[in-house]
Amino acid sequence: MPKLQMFSGRQPSGNLLALHGYDKVRQKGSHIIMQKLQGKTAITIPVPDHEGVKTGTLLSIIRQTGLPHALV
């Protein structure tokens, strides 16, 4: 797997997740809450709004979305 580049919290939430149907539903403190409706359920993902998101946190966001790593 290729090395992940460093992202700020706004990049995954504003660009990548929005392109795949996730909407910003609210923000509490330094976390942006993104949500995607899928049938009768909703997938909710908190994204930290920090200067740099750690690799483990970014991998967790990718895993929660179900998107393949190649799209990120």
Image (cartoon, rainbow, N blue to C red):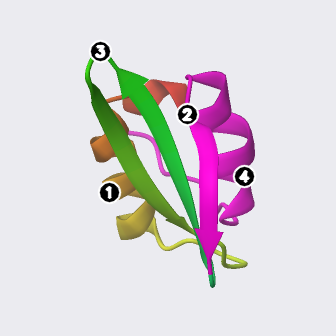
Disc sitting over residue 19 in the figure: none
Return the disc, 1 or 3, that comes first in the chain's sequence: 3
Q: Mark 4, residues whose alpha carbon is within 10 Å: few (<14), some, or many (≥20)?
A: some
Q: Residue at x 53, y 48 (%)?
A: 34
Residue 55 shown in magenta = no
Write the start and end of the magenta stretch as one range: 1-28
Q: Is residue 53 above or below residue 3?
A: below
Q: Mark 3, residues whose alpha carbon is within 10 Å: few (<14), some, or many (≥20)?
A: few
Picture quarter containing residue 2? top left
Disc sitting over residue 11 in the figure: 4
Q: State the separation of the CA atoms marked 1 and 3.
A: 23 Å
Q: State the separation of the CA atoms marked 4 and 1.
A: 15 Å
Disc sitting over residue 39 in the figure: 3
Q: Is residue 7 above or below residue 2?
A: below
Q: State the separation of the CA atoms marked 4 and 2.
A: 13 Å
Return the disc, 4 or 2, that comes first in the chain's sequence: 4
Q: Amino acid at mark 1?
A: Ser
Return the disc, 1 or 2, that comes first in the chain's sequence: 2
